[in-house]
Image (tube, rainbow, N blue to C red):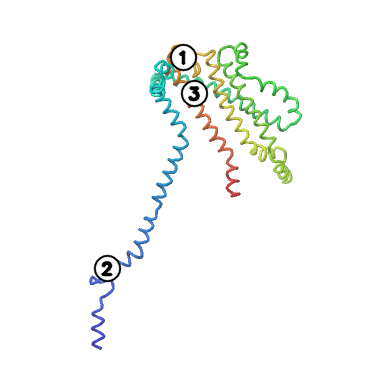
Amino acid sequence: MTTTLTQTEAAPKAGSPADPGAAVEPALSAESTPALSAESTTPAPGKVRRVASAAGSVLWKSAAILAFLALWELGPTYLASPSTRVFLPPLHEVLLAWGKLFEAGTIQGHIAASLTRSVSGFGAALVAGVSLGLLIAWYGRLNSVLNPLLELFRNTAALALLPVFTLLLGIGEESKISIVAYAAFFPVLLNTIAGVKTVDPLLIRAARSLGLNSFRLFQKVILPSAVPTIFTGIRMAGTASILVLIAAEMVGAKAGLGYLIVNAQSSFLIPDMYAGILTVSLLGLGVNFLLVALERHFSRWRTAVGAAAS
């Protein structure tokens, strides 16, 4: 009996100060260790790799542009003769000229004038091209009647008709908006017709077997299927509207990017001329990005179908 009591008193109690590590070690091993291991396995290296991969992808995609800009900056200074540098200034001189035009408010006024004309003509061409394209593709007889006339005008360059628009409508805004609408109309029209005609016939038969009437068939099947092809024409029309407008503004205008370019050239303000050209390029790039974003928005069903199939 005495031996048992002595051994019991000699054994330290769990959690007593005599063995402080006995209570601490289980807590660390049971609670703190998983938390620390979870934090240590948080994908910090994975995030770094993803960021590095994204940065490398951006650099690779923009390598050609960066090389072109570097050549534009260094080429006139180190590779071209002094006489050539007068007509081809380095990139920094062009950017300085652009900054001066921006500070004076000149470039903003020209951009606003060009955008107003381009958006007006492009909007008219978009409404007319999509509407007429859907009608022509849906009604075969209308296609047979209008197709010869449309082919005749489609193969007539828009800039070749610029003198006609100028003579009939004057040198004001009407002629410029009309020539832009004419140039942007045919890409939208032809791609709308192609988009409707290339809809899968099996989809149409399946929709008719489900009891859809003509309007619901057109709304739920034909138009969504034709959206990607229609937006291809819209993007082509957006580019054409800017290019044709610049040419029209060079002929007769008192404002706009085309007027800025030709006026700077005639006044021998070469950096200002290149600043206008660079602005046109950036404007066209921005319009293209905007149209691509709209195409993705209206074609979300394709992404959903592809994800479901995979």
The disc labelled 3 sits on which kind of residue?
Val
Between marks 1 and 2 in the image, the one whose residue lies nearer the viewer: 1
> Which image quarter: residue 101?
top left
Is label 2 in a helix, a strand or a loop?
A: helix
Q: Which mark is residue 71?
A: none
Residue at the image position 55 percent from the left and 35 percent from the top = 294
* Mark 3 lies on residue: 280
Residue 25 locus on image (x, y percent): 30, 67
* Mark 1 lies on residue: 265
Viewer-proximal residue among 72 and 50: 72
Q: Cα distance, mark 1 to mark 2? A: 86 Å
Residue at the image position 75 percent from the left and 25 percent from the top = 145
Q: Earlier in the sequence, mark 1 or mark 2?
A: 2
The disc labelled 1 sits on which kind of residue?
Gln
Is label 1 in a helix, a strand or a loop?
A: helix
> Which image quarter: residue 96?
top left
Q: Earlier in the sequence, mark 3 or mark 2?
A: 2
Residue at the image position 64 percent from the left and 38 percent from the top = 224
Viewer-proximal residue among 157 and 186: 157
Q: Earlier in the sequence, mark 3 or mark 1?
A: 1
* Mark 2 lies on residue: 21
Q: Cα distance, mark 3 to mark 1? A: 15 Å
Mark 3 is surrounded, within 10 Å at the Cα level, by few (under 14), some (14 to 19) or many (20 or more) other residues, namely many
Residue 31 locus on image (x, y percent): 35, 63
Q: Cα distance, mark 3 to mark 2? A: 74 Å
The disc labelled 2 sits on which kind of residue?
Gly
Residue 219 locus on image (x, y percent): 66, 38
